Structures are given as structure tokens and as C-alpha cells.
Image: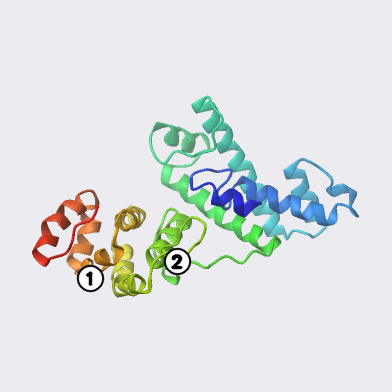
Amino acid sequence: MKKSIEENSDDEQNIKLTAGGIRDIEFSVQALQLIHGGEKENLRTGNSLKAISELAKEELLTPEESHTLSKAYILFRKIEHFVQLMNDKQTHTIPKEGDTLYKLSRYLEFENEKQFTSKVTELKRKVRDVYNNILAVKEESSPKFMEAVDFSNYQKASKDFQFLARGLSLIGEKQFDTNTAKAFQNVESDLIELLRETQDPDLVLENFTRVIKNSKIPSVWYKTFEDRSLLKALSNCVCSIRVQLIRWLPRHNWPITF
């Protein structure tokens, strides 16, 4: 059921439905209640925070898991209520930038928007770990280099990287052929190094992924980016990267596809 929800929602900013969000907390708690509630009457409650507390008392959650779920649930609910009040509608999406994000960060007593975003990302990762442990879910691990890159949104970055490597669709289907996958391997190490060096790895990876998604022949772009100077240009000027490529590709007899 949870997998179906995630497959039908690609909004990483949705604090309710995204991996590690409110639904992960509720599914984790309710799974334990369903399993043990028949014998333990104290677990039969519709209050998520009380249920977390009772599950910890019964040692069905470790102290660390209980602390993570409680802290995340309180923060995520505050975020949910704030964005709904500010937008005057039923929404669960955290703004990526702008006045609402600034006010939300200050309301929750964070020093700035970056600190707020980092804390939410950290809690989502911890909640997801608890969720996976309880429901015995084995997720495909992120590439090892992810830990060395200072991404703001590791979950989205991991999905983008997996798409670049295999062309994974939203439902996890492998789309790239063998030649395209091999072409990516030729630029993979340079891309990783670029992401480590750039000030905004999220934006660089997002724009690189957007170029590949919009291309009819991804392998051509991978071969193009074997020229590291062009790959570097993506980091230095992501907004005008296509203009630079349009000027460069004809001289090397590469087809242009947008």
C-alpha cells in the first residue's frame, strides 16, 4: 500500500507522502499495533504519539527509534499545519524557496532555511530507516559516493543518479539499453568529482538529469560529456548549458536533440 502511494507521488517536498514523511511514521506504528495490539490492550490507541510511547514501554521500539519517530512526527505535523494555514488550502508541500519557507523556518526557530531543510532531510532519513526495519523493506542502496557529496535532498539525488545510470522509471523499470549504460560509466567518475567540487550539487545533478530525460538519444549526450570541459560548464553555467552545447556539437558532428 505504501509503495503504491509513493509510486503515484513524485513530490519530494510532500511532508506527508514522501519517503520518511508522516505516512512512514503512521504505517510503522500501525503495523506494530496490528501485530501486538491483540495481546496488549495499551497499544490500542488512535493517537500516534501515545502509541509510540506505549510501543517503547513494551520494548517494541528502541529508545532511539521512539525518539526519532516522536520528534519527527511533532515537527512534520507543525510543518503541515503551517503550510496549510499560509496557503489556506489542504496541502502538504514544503516550499523550496521564497517567503513562506523563510517564515516557516523562523516559526520553527531555525536560524535559516538551510538549517531547517537539513534537519527535515536528516529526520526523513532516520524515519525511513525505522520504517524499513519494521516492515522488513530492503531498498536499493544509494551509490557510495552519495555520502561524500553535500546534497540537501539525498533521496532525490539518489533517484536522479539511478536514472542516469539505468534510466529507471517511476515504477523502477529499467529503460536504458546496454550501450547507453556503458556510455554513462565512461563519464560517471567525472560527474562524481564534479558534484563533490560544486557549491550546489543538487542543482547540477538535477539539470544534468533533466538534459538526459529530455533527450531522445541519451548515449549521445554521455559521449559528449566525455569532454570534461563541457561537463564542467554544466556546473559553472547550468542555465545556459544547452546554448553552449548547441555551439559545440555541430563542430563535432553530434546530432542536437531537445
Q: Position of residue 130 (x, y in %)?
A: 65, 59
Label 2 environment density (alpha carbons within 10 Å; few <14, some 14–19, many ≥20): few
Q: Amino acid at mark 2?
A: Glu
User: Foreground residue, 61 or 229?
Assistant: 229
Secondary structure, mark 2, is: helix
Does residue 76 appear left or right of residue 94 in this picture? right
- The coloring applied to the image is rainbow
Check disc 2 and report the residue beneath it. 147
Q: Position of residue 215 (x, y in %)?
A: 29, 57
Q: Position of residue 20 (x, y in %)?
A: 58, 52
Q: What number is the disc on residue 30?
A: none
Q: Earlier in the sequence, mark 1 or mark 2?
A: 2
Q: Disc 1 and disc 2: Cα gap in Å?
A: 24 Å
Q: Amino acid at mark 1?
A: Glu
- Residue depicted at 55% across the width and 52% down the height: 7
The relative height of residue 98 versus residue 53 in the rendered view (above or below) is above
User: Foreground residue, 234 or 98?
Assistant: 234
Q: Is residue 42 visible?
A: yes
Q: Position of residue 91 (x, y in %)?
A: 54, 33
- Residue depicted at 34% across the width and 55% down the height: 213
Q: What number is the disc on residue 226?
A: 1
The relative height of residue 94 versus residue 176 in the rendered view (above or below) is above
